[in-house]
Amino acid sequence: MTEPSRVLNPLLRQRLMSADAAAALIRPGDNVGMSGFTGTGHPKAVPAALARRIAQAHRDGEPFKVGVWTGASTAPELDAALAQVDGIELRLPYQSDPVCRERINAGRMEYLDIHLSHVAQFVWSGFIGHLDVAVVEVAGILEDGRLVPAASIGNNKTWLDQADRVILEVNAASPDLEGMHDIYYGTHLPPQRMPIPLVRPDDRIGEAYYRCDPAKVVAVVQTNAPDRDTKFSLVDDASRRIAGHIIEFLQHEVKKGRLPRELLPLQSGVGNIANAVMAGLQDAPFDNLTAYTEVLQDGMLALLKSGKLRSASATALSLGAQALAEFERELDFYRSRIVLRPQEISNHPEIVRRLGVIAMNGMIEADIYGNVNSTHVHGTRIMNGIGGSGDFARNAWLSIFMTPSTAKNGAISCIVPMASHVDHTEHDVQVIVTEQGLADLRGLSPKQRSQLVIENCAHPDYKPLLRDYVRRALESGSGRHTPHLLQEAFNWHLQAQAGERMGGLPKA
Amino acid sequence: MTEPSRVLNPLLRQRLMSADAAAALIRPGDNVGMSGFTGTGHPKAVPAALARRIAQAHRDGEPFKVGVWTGASTAPELDAALAQVDGIELRLPYQSDPVCRERINAGRMEYLDIHLSHVAQFVWSGFIGHLDVAVVEVAGILEDGRLVPAASIGNNKTWLDQADRVILEVNAASPDLEGMHDIYYGTHLPPQRMPIPLVRPDDRIGEAYYRCDPAKVVAVVQTNAPDRDTKFSLVDDASRRIAGHIIEFLQHEVKKGRLPRELLPLQSGVGNIANAVMAGLQDAPFDNLTAYTEVLQDGMLALLKSGKLRSASATALSLGAQALAEFERELDFYRSRIVLRPQEISNHPEIVRRLGVIAMNGMIEADIYGNVNSTHVHGTRIMNGIGGSGDFARNAWLSIFMTPSTAKNGAISCIVPMASHVDHTEHDVQVIVTEQGLADLRGLSPKQRSQLVIENCAHPDYKPLLRDYVRRALESGSGRHTPHLLQEAFNWHLQAQAGERMGGLPKA
């Protein structure tokens, strides 16, 4: 073992051990709070060691499962490794792992899909059970025992505060982010809560390090492993057109005086469309932008680099290999422009509302009345989870949801008569965008919205069918506030489940 | 006309006129912001005069409609009068009037159903159009032109600030509430927003009177008319049992250390069940209670009287005749214990989250996975609107939804396989209660929730059918995260639409 130069605290140096030895300190039935948000900052070694231990226990005929709580999604060496051995009893609050997803949808793993801003509160309140162990990746341990955070913060502060036992992974490959973090220690449970003193997106209200009682630390494991290389597709035509519609809309809002010229803090969901919007902003006539978001992706980094974006607040970095290299080359430049916070602050309704963010999130489908499904394919199969989209959409200045108008080569319309699951209600969705166009639903009744969503957002193949649905629903004698034909509201989903094209359309 | 003793400002005394003369100042196509929240504080004379004018215009073959924006529900002399003559183009943000409801569901009136906390922001932002006229009831006009609020505040501050023209109704029958109001003038649009400095439910952070530019006041109309007499049914057995389950649950939470002995601020929706819960608290082992809610009803007044409730914050009083008489007898007692605020503050997500309210709201139906429908009968017909239930539920410490397990003499189950409209998603619903029992959904996956909701909350007649639905959905091969049979998810609603008993059960 090399000199543990990132572990400066003498007491914690005595806790150095192998991942297997650390994993042996986790017991069947434990709830384990792991670091990790969008593929960064998750523990790299202990989860896999735990998975090996669980597999052995199962081979020995012994039951062994744990509860796995994280910030958000992690990486195969955590989620897939543990799911593969049927080691997860219950997973929360967000995942995007194929193995996990398969297990959940097969009914073999419980999954609790909650607003990311609610997680810390639910753990502090004791609503979702006791947290036994924290397994948290850090970039280093200071001499006084404080911990240098890694590339994501997520719920780490809460895990370190609440767990009985703490296992630390000190990752020598973690970039030098010291000073970029802002860990707020002012949260309380009611009735002791006070206003959170954050009024500008780049305000610093906390500390640069985690506090952690060294007496609780049962193991320190050294690793040297990179974060997940988050690959983005090249910006495709549909994403480029969605971005174009959004930027045109924002320009219109500025012109009408409903947005300042530097806009309001941007929140952007994870993925290719979000990245495309950021790319589009590169050439848009807005300057001095700010971001108050969950995840800082490649597109946002480029905006920082070009100077279009003045500052960005997030709870995690999630960069592709090339962007990460650029980031590490210019660390000090980015250090002065990026703040990483706990997700209870990055997603806090109080702050999101106060700042008036522009929330831009992807979705699975929207219905013609403006209800959005972010989580369930055909109403039953979980995709990833709601993540922070609800935290932002409900409290945003503008809540925008975006998707290509179709999926699976046009076999699926992402604009449907009725959403098969609702994560964002008609009360929370202001703007829907597809590559076809943008529907500004503000101030419109459900019937009025349906016209706009169909005409502006639906794919031309599906427009006549959607118009026909509304016409027949209006004529049916059921209520005309939100006209529906309940007997056929999900026919399209049933057709898709049967492998047919939605709407009974001929295969493309 | 008697001496206008409640109109002390000399300039505004010059604006005294009849309701008909005032209504003549409202133009076709105007958006009119009217006072009124749960049957109190609405203008008593001008809306009816406007309705007469509109009826005459229609007889003369002239189109005449207005947009009607309020705090929440009003009374027949406003909503019914204007709807009856087809005088409303678009209504927002909440209504409970039978004539309005009929017009909306017939497709003859547009209705915009939005979170009550969003209304002021949407008007200030210009998102829902320009406010032309305010028609606001007040209890009096001070010599310096400031206005004494009446029994509800709602959006009055915003109407007075934003409207081009202001019509005031000074109601001589309004009780002497001077000093009970707290009008906060510290709200801004982003990026200028600051923390709202309210940290205890009874904090006063504003002023006792409305500011109003006298130059904008085009008419002052004197009235002498009582508010709506909000009649409550006697507490029935189902409501009493629902209240009992909630109180038992709260005691359990105190015992577990998850609630302080004096609980947290209570929010209680409008209606008989809410009133029953308050009646139940009278005999419950909690003292020093507080309330942070929208509407102060009879039950809460009785809790104040008995001393169980230390203070109550609301945006409106809504009392039956007997409770109102008691209130007026002991005005000074209640004045020191009640704070009335603008609804943007009573319902503000920042405050609701900070205080950690216990939110208790009624609903139309819940599904077995914990999605709640608060607004639409059989998915298409609007009942009233979402009101403030979303403001509270999303940000509450505990979000509780309650309903009798059946409606229409058992023909309708209020626990259904799939909610026919979703106002509160699975992510926002922690507890469901019927007279049958209580389901604590915290920390449970959808499948686990379904067991609890069926076994604890559904009526015995419907339990076997719901169990069978879940079993067949699990076996169907569709996703097992949230098992559904989309082809029959709404069969019960279709049966009810056809006048049959849900589930194909024989008529009781």
Image: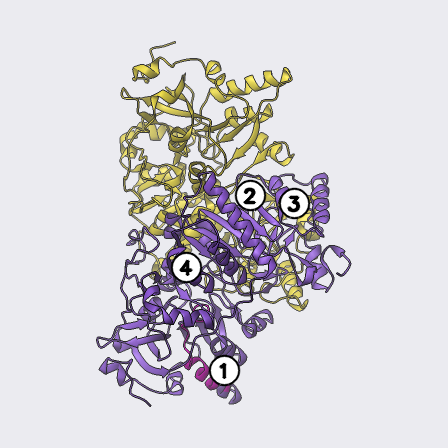
Chain colours: A yellow, B purple
Residue B134 appears in the picture as rendered? no
Identify the element where label 1 is drawn.
loop
Give the residue at mark 2.
Answer: B441
Range drawn in magenta: B36-55
Mark toward the start of the polypeptide (1 vs 4): 1
Q: What's the CA distance linking mark 2 and mark 4?
A: 33 Å
Instruction: Name the image quarter holding the N terminus of chain B.
Output: bottom left
Labels 3, 4: front one:
4
Q: Mark 1 packing: few (<14 Cα in 10 Å), some, or many (20+)? A: few
Give the residue at mark 4.
Answer: B306
Q: What's the CA distance linking mark 3 and mark 4?
A: 37 Å
Identify the element where label 3 is drawn.
helix
Horizontal and vertical percent for residue A272? 48, 40
Chain letter behind tag 3: B
Q: Is residue B51 magenta?
A: yes
Horizontal and vertical percent for residue B168? 34, 78
Nearest to the observer: residue A20 or residue A188: A188
Give the residue at mark 3.
Answer: B455
Q: What's the CA distance linking mark 1 and mark 4?
A: 54 Å
Q: Mark 4 packing: few (<14 Cα in 10 Å), some, or many (20+)? A: few
Labels 1, 4: front one:
4
Q: Mark 3 packing: few (<14 Cα in 10 Å), some, or many (20+)? A: some
Answer yes or no: are tags 3 and 1 on the same subunit: yes
Labels 2, 1: front one:
2
Amino acid at dot 2? Leu
Labels 2, 4: front one:
4
